[in-house]
Each structure stands twice: as structure tokens, then as C-alpha cells.
Image (tube, helix red, strand yellow):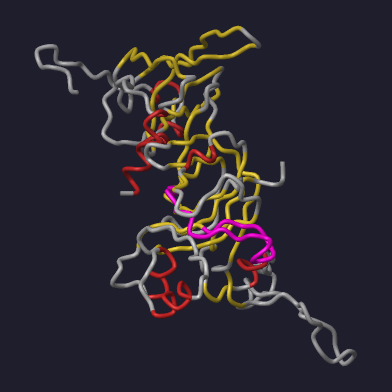
Amino acid sequence: MVAGLLGRKVGMTQIFDSVGQVIPATVIQAGPCHVLQLRTVERDGYEAVQLGYLDKPRRLAGRSVRGHVAKLESKRQKRRAAGGMEAVPKADCEPKRWVREFRGPIEGLQVGQELKVDVFSEIVAVDVVGTSKGRGTAGVMKRHGFHGQRASHGVKKVHRHAGSTGCCTDPHRIFKGRRMPGHYGAVRRTVRNLKVVQVDVENNLLVVRGAIPGPNGGYVMIQQTNKL
Amino acid sequence: MSQQLMSLVEKASIKEEVSQFEIGDTVDVHCRILEGEKERIQIFNGVVIARASSGTRATFTVRRIVQGEGVERKFPLHSPRIAKVEVKRSGVTRRAKLYYLRDRKGKAVRLKERRVDTKKKPKQ
């Protein structure tokens, strides 16, 4: 079974372990998630489980979204039924705000099943995928960790600039891949092998050691790590 | 909402009863020290010159003079390694951070003792 769940970052804090050492911890509100669909090798060419997290008001959900989670009456469906086609199993839940797939074996899972944070109770470490904080247009010091230039000794107005970007008449161009200022952040990032510190099934909370990408309230995918 | 969720996690790391002391107090900090299997208590004596942060992050700084050299130690207030904090003497202070003590030497380090009014009930 795939041990994966969708959630939101709550924030970071520090807690004490049994020896009295401080653990830097991130609290994630993980699940409950409904299984919306199962991908199979015969039908889709790969195995995966599709999960949905948080309800979306029906008035905001399009017909395709509503039809994805529950059975809707439609001419097409009637025709298919009349033609003897098997109805696709539906989760029969509210439309979901955030839907993602987790690849992996699907035995033991059923469409409509509700997964809670206890899927991680036996698991030592997880990988967390999120969207990093957007920093807008950033300079080379922030974006690439350049050292900038000196504060004095004749340096004028270029303290946070990069130095030279290339050669002279030969080759007469700048090589591809030169690191420069530009848009930074707000991209998908994965942090791997974070130790699970605490699993609180009652409040749907997962506590991991270390930081995860994105702002508080950001959406994250959590999956058992393959890095152990 | 997120604050409430956070406090659920932090609750286990926050001591229900924290020793009461104030800035300027001379205290004995009883630290648990693990030596292999054995545990013993070590006492750090000094003046509380600062308290910082809140929640599980709360810390306090204790300053003492060892062989003429100032030594400061910062303790996490809720750490299980702090067995207790005993107030030995209370000092009169007019500010929350006593960093000015760092610049003082000898007799000038002393703080005036604060007399606790025994008739009044102690502050909770």
C-alpha cells in the first residue's frame, strides 16, 4: 500500500525529546483524504492512488469535478449503461479542493476509502513535496549564494552585484547557464528523509523533524521516503 | 486555528509548573546531567539578567562571575534537564534586561535587595 497523504503546513516549533534535547519540528495537518481513483496497469499503464484533500463547496465545483467524486445523472452515462458498460466506481464524497496522485502499489485500497494520518504510524521517515516561498525577482546573492563585492576599497554601488559574467572579444558572447538575477522561489521542492516525530490521529497532525518547503498554510504532499 | 493546532503539539513540551523567578533574582539552577547511565544534579548559581521568547522556546539567561571572569548561561525554561530554579535572593531592577551588568566590575555588580512584603499575597 502507498503510504501517502495530502496536507497543509501549520508551522514550525521546537519540542523536547525524552533525553531533553530540542527537536526542531514542523507541524503538518495531514488528511483525512479520500481515495478518489485507483490507477491500474491494465487501464492506465501504471499503479497509483489518487487522493483528494479538503472539501470544496459544491457551488464552486464544476460539473466535471462533482462528477469525478460522485455519480451524476447524464445522458452519456445512461447510454453507456444501456450499452452494457460497467460503471466506474466513485468515492461518493464532497468535491475536493486539492487532488494529487501517489505512485505505488495499490493493494488494500478502495475508492471512497478515507485515509488518515495513522498511515504514517509505523513509518520512520517521510518525503515532503511543497511549493517553496516565492521571492519575486531576486539578485545573485540571494538566488545563487554569490558573495557579492567588497564594502570598500573602491567598490562603488555594486556591493551586491556579481562580478564579471564572461570573457571578451573571443568568444564575444556569454555562455549558457551563467547564473544571473531573476525570478526565485515558488517552485515545487522536495525535502527527503524527514524523521517522523509524532502522529496525532485525533487531530490529524503529523510532526516531522526539520523544515519543509512553503509558507504556513501551504499545501504539501507527504509520502513514505524511499531514501532510507 | 493554526495556533490552536500548534499548541496541541507544544503542550507536551511545556512544563505545567514553572519555577517562579524574576529578572534580577539570584538563583540556583538545578541541571540534570547524564553521565553514562548515572544522573546527577549540577547547580549553576547567578543573577537572572534576561528572559526571552515564549512557548516552548522560552529561555532565561543567568550570569555569574567565576574567578573574575563573567560567565553567562542560557537555559531553555521548559527543558526537562532543568530540575528546578531556586530563588536565593531578589534584586531591585528597573529594566527587563540587565545587560548593563556586563560592563560592571566588582562591587558595582551588586543589586539592591528587594524586600518582599509578607503581608501581601505573593503575585501569581
Find residue B109 and report its image quarter.
top left
Residue at the limit of the structure toward the left, as seen here: B119
Q: Quadrant of the C terminus of chain A?
A: top right
Percent of width and height locating residue A44: 65, 66
* Horizontal relation, residue B36 to residue B77: left or right: right
Residue A6 vs A152, above or below: the answer is above
**In the rendered image of this protein, does residue B119 appear above or below residue A36?**
above
| Residue A92 location (% of width, % of height) | 39, 58
The relative height of residue A174 versus residue A122 in the rendered view (above or below) is below
Q: Front-most of B85 and A78?
A: A78
Is residue A108 highlighted in magenta? no
Question: Which residue is at the front of the view, A175 or A202?
Answer: A202
Q: Residue at x 51, y 9 (%)?
A: B41
Horizontal side of residue A54 vs B20, given as left or right: right
Tell me, yes or no, whether the highlighted magenta stretch contains residue A47.
Answer: yes
Which residue is depicted at the point 88% across and 89% down?
A171
Residue segment shown in magenta: A29-50
